[in-house]
Amino acid sequence: MCINSCAAFVGPYADYDMCPECGQHRFDQIKFTKSNGRIKNPRAVFHTIPIGPQL
Ligand SMILES: [Zn+2]
């Protein structure tokens, strides 16, 4: 998801490299550039927690 939590890169945004809302890069640009685009390390990941174990 976006580092500013404004969008998740799923569905129509799955192929986006930058946030459609704030323009922040999706991936860690240092690792991305050093690896010539091979390492796409997301800057933020949205974790969904199953509701069952919480109850
Ligand atoms: Zn954003």
Image (cartoon, rainbow, N blue to C red):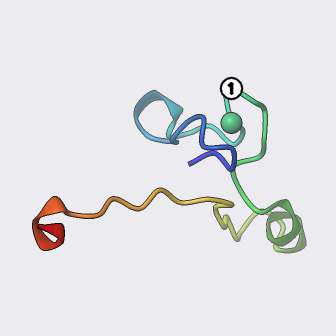
Q: Where, quadrant-wise, is the C terminus in this rendering?
A: bottom left
Q: Does residue 39 lie above or below 2 as drawn?
A: below
For the residue with label 1, is its CB less than 8 Å from the closest atom of ligand 1? yes
Can you give x and y, in whole percent of width and height, for residue 8 in the image?
A: 51, 41
What is the count of numbered marks? 1
Q: Nearer the viewer, residue 50 or 32?
A: 50
What residue sits 14% from the left and 73% below the top?
53
At label 1, the amino acid type is: Glu
What residue sits 60% from the left and 35% below the top?
6
Q: Nearer the viewer, residue 53 or 6?
A: 53
What residue sits 10% from the left and 66% below the top?
52
Relative to residue 1, is residue 39 drawn left or right?
Answer: right
Can you give x and y, in whole percent of width and height, for residue 46 in the image?
A: 47, 56
Can you give x and y, in whole percent of width and height, for residue 36 in the image?
A: 84, 67
Relative to residue 38, is residue 55 drawn left or right?
Answer: left
Residue under pointer 1: 21
Judged from this view, the residue extending furthest toward the front is: 55
What residue sits 71% from the left and 57% below the top?
27
Can you give x and y, in whole percent of width and height, for residue 48 in the image?
A: 33, 59
- Residue 10 in which image quadrant: top left
- Residue 18 in which image quadrant: top right
Ligand number 1: quarter of image:
top right
Q: Does residue 9 lie above or below 45 as drawn?
A: above
Q: Nearer the viewer, residue 10 or 35?
A: 10
Q: Secondary structure at mark 1?
A: loop
Badge 1 density bin: few <14, some 14–19, many ≥20, Cα 10 Å: few
